[in-house]
Image (cartoon, grey):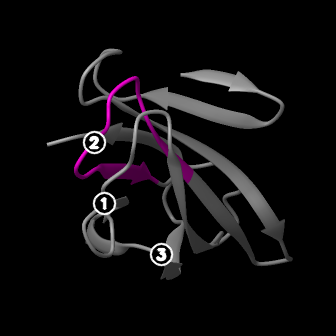
Amino acid sequence: MISTNGQVVAPGTPPGSGSCTATYRTSQQWGDRFNGEVTVRAGESAITSWTVTVTLTSPQQVSTTWNGTPTYSGNVMTMKPNGNGNLAANASTTFGFTVMANGQWAQPSVSCQTP
């Protein structure tokens, strides 16, 4: 993981064909929750789909998502694209979610994988 300017970048598969990266940033914060935004970027080659794993710190919980289709297992949210998920080489897309902090303000960690 690389952290720059408050953003956390987690690599997916190694650079080259079929790779992606996920970058997290907190876009808004209130007294009890915050909005997170993840940018998914294709590597040097186009990709046909992606899956991003978002790991929260307990007792955080996701209350709302947008621009993706989530599934949940404990404190892990797996987000897949709405639609086909195609990204041209070096192109990006974003999705977001609201986290109920429940007293825990740690930033989620993210990682990206391609099929």
Tell me: residue 22, above or below residue 72.
above
Quarter of the rendering containing residue 74: bottom left
Q: Nearer the viewer, residue 11 or 93?
A: 93
Tell me: residue 95, above or below residue 67.
above
Cα distance in 3D space between marks 3 and 1: 11 Å
Q: Say which mark, if any, is on residue 28.
A: none
> In terms of secondary structure, where does tag 2 sit?
loop
Q: Residue at x 63, y 34 (%)?
A: 8
Over which residues does the magenta segment extend? 39-55
Asked whether 8 falls inside the magenta stretch, the response is no
Q: Are marks 2 and 1 in contact (CB under 8 Å)?
A: yes
Q: Which residue is mark 3?
A: 67
Quarter of the rendering containing residue 82: bottom left
Tell me: residue 66, above or below residue 80.
below
Cα distance in 3D space between marks 2 and 3: 18 Å
In percent of width and height, residue 12 lies at 35, 29
Q: Is residue 11 left or right of residue 57?
A: left
Q: Amino acid at mark 1?
A: Gly
Q: Say which mark, if any, is on residue 85.
A: 1
Cα distance in 3D space between marks 2 and 1: 8 Å
